[in-house]
C-alpha cells in the first residue's frame, strides 16, 4: 500500500503501536485489578469492548491491495457491465495446489530465514530487541515493586520512561526519512537498502547505555532515587525503536517481491524470542541479581552493534549473492 517514499513513516506508526502497547498495558491492568468495582475480568472485557468495532470497520474500510486480485475484480466488473464473458484477468486461470500453498506460505519463510545471511542475522538482532521488550515486563516489577517497594500499579508507572523513549525513537526515524528520500531521489528512485541503516546505528549505541544504566542504578535501590532508573527508559526505548524500525524497512527494501515471506520468517523468530525471554527473565534477574544480569545483556547488546556496521559496509555484497534479494542500486 505504501511506496518507497512513504513506507518508512508507515512502518514507524505500526512499530510504535507494537512497542508502546506492551509498555502502557501493565499499569492500566494493575489499576483495573485493584479497583473493587472492576476486578481482573475487566482486563479482558475492556480489550473486547475496544477491539470489537474492528469487526465492523475492517470489512467496511479495508479494500484488496494484491494487484492480481484487483485485476480479477476489475475483469468481473467489466464482464457484468458489458456482458462480454470472454474478458478475464490472468489470475483467473491460475489455480494453486496444496503443495504450492505450503511452499509459499510455510516453507519459504523458514527457508529464507535460515539460508539468507541478511535475513538471519538482522532477524536475530531484531528478535533479541523484541525479546528485551518483554523481558522488561519482568525486570521493571523486580526493580520498582520488589526493590523500591512500590505498590502494584504505581510500580508500573516507570514504564512511561520507556514509552516516551520509544516515541522519541519513532520521531527520530521519521526525521531520518527526509535524508532517505533525498538519497532515493538522487539515485533516480532506485532503492539502496543500506540507506535505511543510519538510525539503526544510533539505536544500537543508545540501547546498551540505557540497559546498563537501568540495571545498575536499579540494583542500588537503597541508595539511588527511583527516578534515575526510570530516566534510563528514554535511552532503552529510543534504542528499541531505533533498531526495530530500520531493520523492518531494510528487510522490505532488500527482498521487495519476497518481502512478505521475509517478514514472516522474521516474525517467526521474533515472536519466539518474545515468548521465551519472560520465561527465564525472573530466574536470571533473581539468581544473577539485576546488575550482573544487566551487564551480561548489555555486553551482548554492545557486540550486536557490529550488525548495522556490517550491513552498511557489506550489505550490497551480500544482496548480490542472495537468491531472493533484489539489487536495484
Image (tube, rainbow, N blue to C red):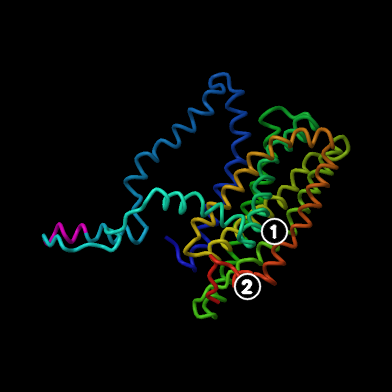
Residue topped by disc 1? 203
Would residue 107 appear left or right of 199 to someone viewing this image? left
Query: Between tags 2 and 1, which lies in front?
Result: 2
Q: Is 320 on the left or on the right of 142, as rendered?
A: left
Helix or strand or loop: what does disc 1 sit on?
helix
Q: Are marks 2 and 1 in contact (CB under 8 Å)?
A: no
Expressed as whole percent of the image width and height from the top left, the position of residue 144 reads 76, 34
According to the picture, the residue beneath numbered tag 2 turns out to be 316
- The rendered magenta stretch, by its main secondary structure, is classed as helix
Residue at the image point whose x is 85% and y is 42% from the top:
292
Residue 201 picture location, percent across and down: 70, 63
Q: Residues within 10 Å of mark 1 (few under 14, many from 20)?
A: many
Q: Which residues are magenta?
A: 76-82
Q: Separation of disc 2 and disc 1 at Cα?
A: 22 Å
Q: Residues within 10 Å of mark 2 (few under 14, many from 20)?
A: some
State the image quarter where residue 91 is shown.
bottom left
Tell me: residue 57, above or below residue 26. below
Q: Residue at x 67, y 58 (%)?
A: 121
Q: Observer-nearest residue: 211 or 314?
A: 314
Furthest-left residue in this view = 83
Q: Is residue 242 visible?
A: no
Residue 261 as seen in the image, left or right of residue 211: left
Count of picture labels: 2
- Say which quadrant the N terminus sits in: bottom left
Question: SS at mark 2?
Answer: helix
Q: Residue at x 15, y 57 (%)?
A: 80
| Residue 327 vertical position relative to residue 84 in the rendered view, above or below | below
Mark linked to residue 294: none
Q: Quadrant of residue 314?
A: bottom right
Amino acid at each position: 500500500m505504501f511506496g518507497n517514499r512513504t513506507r518508512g513513516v508507515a512502518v514507524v506508526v505500526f512499530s510504535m503501536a507494537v512497542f508502546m502497547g506492551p509498555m502502557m498495558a501493565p499499569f492500566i491492568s494493575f489499576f483495573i485489578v485493584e479497583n473493587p468495582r472492576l476486578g481482573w475480568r475487566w482486563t479482558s472485557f475492556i480489550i473486547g469492548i475496544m477491539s470489537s468495532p474492528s469487526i465492523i470497520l475492517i470489512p467496511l474500510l479495508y479494500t484488496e491491495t494484491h494487484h492480481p486480485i484487483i485485476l480479477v475484480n476489475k475483469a468481473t466488473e467489466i464482464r457484468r457491465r458489458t456482458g462480454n464473458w470472454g474478458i478475464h484477468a490472468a489470475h483467473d486461470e491460475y489455480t494453486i495446489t496444496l503443495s504450492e500453498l505450503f511452499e509459499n506460505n510455510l516453507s519459504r519463510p523458514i527457508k529464507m530465514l535460515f539460508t539468507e545471511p541478511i535475513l538471519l542475522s538482522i532477524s536475530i538482532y531484531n528478535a533479541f530487541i523484541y525479546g528485551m521488550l518483554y523481558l522488561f515486563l519482568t525486570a521493571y516489577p523486580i526493580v520498582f515493586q520488589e526493590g523500591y517497594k512500590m505498590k502494584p500499579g504505581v510500580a508500573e508507572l516507570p514504564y512511561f520512561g520507556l514509552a516516551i523513549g520509544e516515541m522519541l525513537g519513532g520521531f527520530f526515524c521519521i526525521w531520518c526519512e527526509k535524508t532517505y528520500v533525498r538519497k532515493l531521489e538522487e539515485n533516480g528512485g532506485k532503492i539502496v537498502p543500506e540507506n535505511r541503516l543510519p538510525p539503526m546505528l544510533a539505536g544500537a549505541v543508545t540501547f546498551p547505555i540505557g540497559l546498563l544504566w537501568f540495571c545498575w542504578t536499579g540494583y542500588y535501590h537503597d541508595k539511588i532515587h527511583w527516578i534515575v532508573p526510570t530516566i534510563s527508559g528514554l535511552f532503552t526505548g529510543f534504542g528499541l525503536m531505533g533498531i526495530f524500525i530500520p531493520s523492518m524497512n531494510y528487510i522490505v527494501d532488500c527482498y521487495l517481491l519476497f518481502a512478505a515471506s521475509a517478514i514472516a520468517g522474521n516474525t517467526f523468530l521474533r515472536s519466539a524470542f518474545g515468548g521465551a525471554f519472560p520465561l527465564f527473565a525472573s530466574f536470571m534477574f533473581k539468581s544473577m541479581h539485576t546488575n550482573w544480569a544487566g551487564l551480561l545483556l548489555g555486553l551482548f547488546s554492545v557486540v550486536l552493534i557490529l550488525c548495522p556496521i556490517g550491513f552498511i559496509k557489506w550489505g550490497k555484497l551480500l544482496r548480490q549473492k542472495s537468491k531472493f534479494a533484489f539489487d536495484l542500486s
